[in-house]
Amino acid sequence: MSNTTHPLHALWLDPFRALRPQDQSALTDLGMDVQVVRTLDELGAPIRAGMVDLVVVGLGQDCELLHAVKDLIDACPSDFKRPSILCRVERRNLEVTVAAMRTGALHVIATDDWAVATWEAALQPVQQPELEKGSETPASKASAVPAVRDVIYVDPVSRNLLALAQRVALANVNVLIEGPTGAGKEVLARVLHESSVVARGPFVGLNCAALPEHMMEDLLFGHEKGAFTGAVKDHRGLFEQAQGGTLFLDEIGELPMHLQSKLLRVLQERMLTRLGSERPVALNVKIVAATNKNLRDAIAQREFREDLYFRLSTFKLRIPPLRERKGDILPMVVRMLARNCANTQTQPWELTPEAQHALLDYSWPGNVRELENVVQRAMVISGDHVIDLAHLMFDDSINPLDFMRGMDLAAPGNAAYNPMSFDKPAVHPAQAMPQSLHATVKHSEFAVIQAALMESKSREEAAQKLGISPRTLRYKLARLRETPDAVGSTA
């Protein structure tokens, strides 16, 4: 990493592991001037003198040392140079990793990770010029340190996205978030809101794909009493409800064309007129839109207005799929398990190393939403608050009925469950041996979907019985039709 100014002055405090000379030399090559200290007293003097850019803290089984370092920094005068904190944690201590991020660590690195790319990503925010430096006014200095919601952004890709989002949030611009379904676009939208100058205002969200077209205009722009039959009182639309805050328009690519033109006019003029009124209403609203569609393709197919696209995308942020930010996976799982413990007042959950590896190796086509489903299934199946490889049911791997065939639910902790039973499924003698596991799963999936459709009045009702969205049901039916050998001629 090139160092364009001066080396980072770093203090290294790790009572659990010694810093080897070759590792210190590698850090020097990355632009760090590392000084090893052994006590908090040795740490305090250089910090109070304003000589430190970074403090590297080695943690054990808890964050006690991190709290002590943070208290030491917080006790210094408000105008002094505040060093960033980087923590090193054993790879298996996921709870400590998450707790360190919540406590205020800039970054957490595994103790056995000395990869140059890892350290470069961790040091980049420290080596970049900070917003607080220079001849800034007090107002700009205060706004440069926004409050950020408690989110899981641990992977270097996610950390860079978070840092960029915080900067974009401080500007008065419309933002378009692009990313696949279930990747966490609304979470990033809330970060943009809570990092902005309108953070104290309301955050109002609308899924443009979830409402009937005839209701959407009234919901967005509102109406006056008597504007139409049934309008018995004035109604403030979402734009007015978001005054002084943020309006989040999710799935903006699904907005009907006639509403796109009206939305464009509102964004241009920053004024709207309720249905049945002649009085315009001035707007002070931050607009954040999101889409999982390629809006460029939608423009080419005349499904989306090009002028609205450029109006919304003053700044674009792309949130990657979960498979491209694997460093977030295990901390997210820890958060989900901890949330369950808090809600149910139960004992803590454990995640075996085999389960951790499986979670990291999976491609996660459904992103964070699929991860939540897999964790919830594992908690249902596990009987002893230990989640193992055998408890992980991925959406694309096996049908629940096949999965449960190999498990003795009456046994304490499901002890009789044998994961090898997948290789030798129970087959009635009169049945033919399946060609492959893939074909068996396809047959089972089609049978369950077909049964749900036959017992339901509509696809929406069938999707509800199956526990999936109507869109997912359409997708699965399309995939099944593309595989005649799996579904037969009745698909």
Image: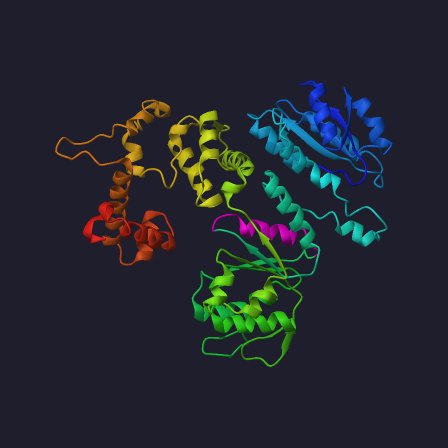
**In this orientation, which residue lies closer to the viewer: 273 or 112?**
112
* Residue 243 coordinates in the image, percent (x, y): 64, 64
Q: Residue furthest left?
A: 430
Q: Residue furthest bottom?
A: 278
The quarter of the rendered structure image containing the N terminus is top right
Where is 412 relative to 299, above or below?
above
- Residue 235 visible? The answer is no
Residue 196 is one of the magenta-drawn residues: yes
* Residue 437 coordinates in the image, percent (x, y): 28, 36
Residue extent of the magenta highlight: 181-197
- In the displayed structure, does residue 340 sit left or right of residue 107? left
The structure residue drawn at horizontal position 55% and vertical position 25%, both measured from the top left corner, is 92
Q: Quadrant of residue 205?
A: bottom right
Where is 269 relative to 74, above or below?
below
- In the displayed structure, does residue 393 sit left or right of residue 347? left
The structure residue drawn at horizontal position 80% and vertical position 54%, both measured from the top left corner, is 139
* Residue 478 coordinates in the image, percent (x, y): 31, 54
Where is 352 relative to 280, above or below?
above
- In the displayed structure, does residue 319 sit left or right of residue 458? right
